[in-house]
């Protein structure tokens, strides 16, 4: 009796874990998944889809994998960070995000245009 109860509890725990796995998106869905002192960007709104997590406040070129794809972002650094249209902080300033702030959607002006960022 006791043994089967333990088995039942373990089975229930496994079911719970499976449900969480299916409920979550494959990549991420929470700006706090971005580690402290990192800047993180995601392809889709609400922190979903492909992503790049970068330590520090500088990224002169986000790279081909994420170039012109960013739709959501999180700034977990202690500085304001500015996001630019071109590499090396050139082109239009598309977004300025305060320390600890995040954007589930950067909006139509900045969407799918960010190529670099730096503290500002
Ligand atoms: Ca996108």
Image: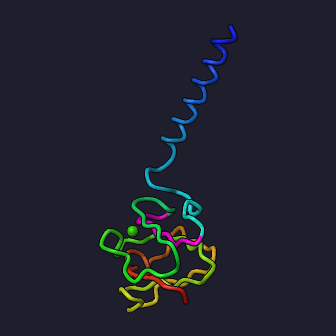
The residue shown at (44%, 66%) is 42
Give the mark count.
Answer: 0
Q: Nearer the viewer, residue 13 or 94?
A: 13
Q: Is residue 4 above or below residue 97?
A: above
Q: Is residue 91 above or below residue 54?
A: below
Q: Is residue 7 above or below residue 59?
A: above
Q: Nearer the viewer, residue 92 or 17?
A: 17
Q: Quadrant of ligand 1?
A: bottom left
Q: Is residue 113 magenta?
A: no
Q: Main secondary structure of the magenta part?
A: strand
The residue shown at (50%, 83%) is 95
Whether residue 26 sits left or right of residue 5 in the image: it is left
Whether residue 80 sits left or right of residue 69 in the image: it is right
Q: Check the image and name the residue furthest to the left.
A: 64
From the top left corner, tell me how far across and down residue 73 is, in percent. 51, 71
> Which segment did they paint magenta?
37-45
From the top left corner, tell me how far across and down residue 115 is, in percent. 38, 80
Whether residue 40 sits left or right of residue 13 in the image: it is left
Q: Is residue 38 magenta?
A: yes
Q: Quadrant of the N terminus?
A: top right
Q: Nearer the viewer, residue 96 or 1?
A: 1
Q: Quadrant of residue 103?
A: bottom right
Whether residue 110 sits left or right of residue 66 in the image: it is right
The residue shown at (58%, 72%) is 37
Q: Check the image and name the residue furthest to the right.
A: 2
Q: Quadrant of residue 78?
A: bottom right
From the top left corner, tell me how far across and down residue 4 is, in percent. 63, 12
The residue shown at (60%, 68%) is 36
């Amino acid at each position: 009796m006791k043994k089967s109860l333990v088995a039942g509890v373990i089975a229930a725990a496994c079911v719970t874990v499976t449900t969480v796995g299916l409920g979550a998106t494959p990549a991420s869905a929470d700006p706090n998944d971005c580690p402290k002192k990192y800047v993180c960007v995601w392809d889709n709104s609400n922190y979903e889809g492909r992503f790049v997590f970068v330590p520090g406040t500088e990224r002169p070129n986000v790279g081909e994998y994420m170039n012109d794809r960013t739709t959501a972002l999180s700034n977990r650094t202690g500085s304001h960070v500015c996001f630019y249209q071109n590499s090396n902080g050139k082109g239009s300033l598309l977004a300025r995000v305060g320390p600890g702030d995040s954007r589930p959607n950067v909006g139509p002006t900045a969407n799918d245009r960010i190529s670099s960022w730096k503290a500002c």
